[in-house]
Amino acid sequence: MKLILGSGSPRRLELLAQIGLTPAEIRAPDIDETPMKAEQPRPYCARMAREKVAAVPIGADEVVLCADTTVALGRRIMGKPSDAGQAAEFLLALSGRRHRVITAIALKKGGQIWARDVVTKVKMKRLSDIELNSYLATDDWRGKAGGYAIQGPASAFIPWISGSFSAVVGLPLAETAALLQATGYPVFGDYR
């Protein structure tokens, strides 16, 4: 069986490598990621993962893994900022507050889909103007939900999390391994 990663995220590729998995191929789906009117963050994130996995064509001997990570401040969905101004807006909203990072994963083998989402609570310290502007200048906010990456320079802003660190990075490894095993994919070798 071949593992297909339905994501162009280098972080997800690195996370899979941490548990010894190398996808046979990467097939990033191209879907509309616009939230529906009044859609809540957790259902939105789960829908995105399912739509991504449904959009990836697979063969009979393949299992595809897709994921979506969303930063939620209350009911507000904070996706990937379009520019530095929006990144600053997101970071100022998160500054000094707790928020949720939701990562939904979906796997498809044949006609069957397995899905799960993981919610992690994250606290960001109150950011000074110097911290905010210095961080924005790194460009690390680009392509990151909520405008930050916990594994990069912004780690200095996160004093506390409750939940899965790997889910905040972009792929909850324990849940991913369990779902892959449910599909019959040999995550830790075939011991039969």
Image (cartoon, grey):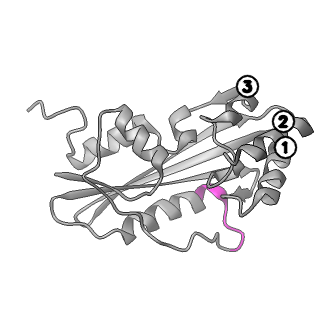
- Amino acid type of disc 1? Asn
Magenta region: 37-43
Give the residue drawn at x 29%, y 39%. Answer: 21
Is 56 left or right of 144, judged from the image as shown?
left
- Residue at the extreme top: 159
Q: Contact (CB < 8 A) between labels 3 and 1? A: no
Q: Quadrant of residue 130?
A: top right
Q: CA distance from mark 1 to mark 2?
A: 6 Å
Query: What quarter of the picture does the C terminus occupy?
Result: top left
Q: Contact (CB < 8 A) between labels 1 and 2? A: yes
Residue 13 lies, with reference to residue 5, above or below; the image says above
Circle on res. 133: 1
- Residue at the extreme left: 192
Give the residue drawn at x 79%, y 59%. Answer: 86
Q: CA distance from mark 2 to mark 3?
A: 15 Å
Q: Secondary structure at mark 2?
A: helix
- Which of the two discs, 2 and 3, labels the residue nearer the N terminus? 2
Is 65 left or right of 137, judged from the image as shown?
left
- Amino acid type of disc 2? Glu
Circle on res. 159: 3
